Amino acid sequence: MTPRGWAVLTLAALVTALLVAGALLVPWHRPPAPRADQLAALRDLPVDQVARGREFRAALRPGAYGALALGLVVALLLGFTPLGARLVELAGRPFGDHWIARAVLGGLAVVLVADLLTLPFAAWRHAVLTRYGLSTHGWSGWTVDLLKSYAVSAVIGAVALLGFYTVTRLAPRWWWAFGAAGAAGLVVLLSFVLPVLVEPVFNRFTPMEQGPLRTELMAMAARDGVPVRDVLVADASRRTKAVNAYVSGLGPTRRVVVYDTLLREATPAEVTSVVAHELGHARDRDVAVGTLTGALGAAAVVVALHLLGSWGPLTRLAGVDSVAEPRAFGLLIALVTVAGLVTAPVQAAVSRRVEARADAHALALTGDPATFEAMQRRLAGVNLADPDPPRWEYLWSASHPSTVERMAAARAYARETGR
């Protein structure tokens, strides 16, 4: 069998593995609460809170979708015209057109151009957050965080680019196989190292102080059978008033993190409800499952890029001879961008089902639907959420169930259990 034949077979196997993993590991059987219950929950929310949340989200929408549209246009121009190849050449020219300079500097230049062109929309978002009082970050702090994100992305990107194009040079016929394995390995590696190396670049994490709340949270984790070494508090208040919590990492790097804003805004019972939700993610190994599917997806993307990149009309549009050369990086970015837009609704749907399962876990673990519903009210109010967003936007990008869905789920649990 030819390398291309093996690539087709490998892609079919990876896609099959992704579909099987999605069918077995994603809780598709958990439908949203009935719409009538959601509308009843919406009527119980303060009218002014709902109006302000919708006004805020409407103010964000032009910048968000403007950035999305411009990013797509830039990616298509750099990938489906010779502009991307010329940019890579320009980046490598001061270094004698050495392939490493083209691979690393050229690749970073392509990404940087797209980032810089969409930068005004990022500034727009920050201005809206500031105007509505959700951001506590001044422009200087926002700029520092932006530069930090560029630096982190540049380091990770440089390593990935150097590794990828080294493989394409050493194994020109089989680079897709080694590249797929490398992409999958990078996803797994980042799941371990991001919590301990990258997250501290943006926030300071400290163990939750000793007291009744910490004791209750650790006892709840033990009762739930979830090994948690610590509950950490992030100093999110230096940049936002939003409240949140999350679980990240695998094995020894797994931790539950709560924002300091959550501790200030919410009651201890509400914090317990939020952490119970995060324990649901840990108990169901959602980070591990996400890492597995991410690794399979990354590997499939590399193989698909090899197969698509060998199609003559595409390479001619990009002005390159092969998708495996550094000058074709713009083409790779364009294909990945289009694929990301096409698969966004599927990723959002998967995330919503996983989050709904974590909500159900929190309700069962705490046995306190009233506090769970109160926490959802608080989250929506403090974070200026639209409790019942437009259907098209919800299906396209919502990573969590809506506020009214979560409130209705709590009420359904209360009816079923008599609590």
Image: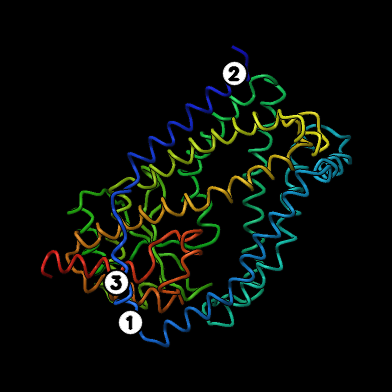
- Asked if the residue under mark 1 is in contact with the one under mark 3, i.e. CB atoms within 8 Å, the reply is no
Q: Name the residue under label 3.
A: 36
Any mark on residue 5, and which?
2
Q: Please, what secondary structure does the residue beneath circle 3 have?
A: helix
Residue occupying the point 36% across, 47% down: 286
Residue density around tag 3, few if under 14, some if 14–19, many if 20 or more, within 10 Å? few
Q: Position of residue 356 (x, y in %)?
A: 32, 58
Q: Earlier in the sequence, mark 3 or mark 1?
A: 3
Residue density around tag 1, few if under 14, some if 14–19, many if 20 or more, within 10 Å? few
Q: Note whether 4 is above or below 238 in the view shown.
A: above
Any mark on residue 43, and which?
1
Q: Please, what secondary structure does the residue beneath circle 1 have?
A: helix
Residue occupying the point 55% across, 57% down: 201
- The span from disc 3 to disc 2 (Cα, nearest Å) is 52 Å
Q: Please, what secondary structure does the residue beneath circle 2 have?
A: helix
Quadrant that contains the N terminus: top right
Q: Where is residue 349 in the image (x, y as percent from the top left)?
A: 42, 53
Decide which of 11, 236 is in the foreground and name it.
11
Quadrant that contains the C terminus: bottom left
- The span from disc 3 to disc 1 (Cα, nearest Å) is 11 Å
Left or right, residue 36 beside residue 412? right
